[in-house]
Image: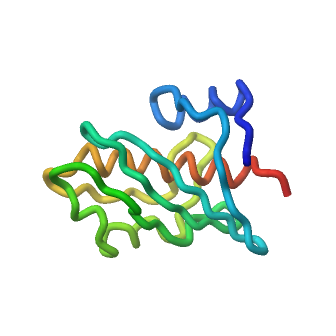
Amino acid sequence: MLTLTAAHQDRIKRLLGHAYRPSRVRYWTSGSRMVVILDEIGKTQPITTGFVLREGKIEQVKLLIYRETIGAETRGTSFTNQFKGVTLGSNGKLSRRINNIAGATLSVRALTELGRVAIYLEQIRPR
């Protein structure tokens, strides 16, 4: 369990564009890999997403529960593979642009924001 301090919450707020409610985040490790499951609102519903990270890079993204009525294309590997190898720059932006999907702009934005948060959490987790 990773307890988010006020400083962590402030950084996450800058990455997401709004406050992140949970004060604790569960994560799992195996060797140098970390798995974290995060939720973010797409248009109106939460999107539950799992991230596998290693050494500050995203290795895999999997949409676990997609509750929105449109934009399910974000579940496809053609979309989620865009995150492979992505890192977080000091400016808070991902190292690669994630292409949008017509009709799923808010879901794509939510997943991109979660990607930034996941990388940040991997950076601050205890070693």
Which residue is rendered at x = 67% and y = 39% of the image?
24
Front in this rendered view, residue 47 or 119: 47
Please state the horizontal and vertical placement of residue 111, each as a whole percent of the image.
Answer: 39, 51
Left or right: where does residue 17 sit relative to residue 71?
right
Please state the horizontal and vertical placement of residue 102, each as a whole percent of the image.
Answer: 15, 54
Q: Quadrant of the C terminus?
A: bottom right
Please state the horizontal and vertical placement of residue 11, each as a whole percent of the image.
Answer: 62, 32
Which residue is rendered at x = 51% and y = 71% of the image?
60
Name above or below for residue 48 compared with residue 21.
below
Which residue is rendered at x = 36% and y = 44% of the image?
46
Front in this rendered view, residue 54 or 72: 72
Residue lying at the far right of the rendered structure: 127
Left or right: where does residue 126 sit relative to residue 85?
right
Total tally of numbered discs in the picture: 0
Quarter of the image for residue 122 reads bottom right
Please state the horizontal and vertical placement of residue 64, each as a whole percent of the image.
Answer: 41, 62
Which residue is rendered at x = 64% and y = 45% of the image?
25
Left or right: where does residue 90 sit relative to residue 114?
right
Left or right: where does residue 104 sit relative to residue 23?
left
Q: How is the image coloured?
A: rainbow
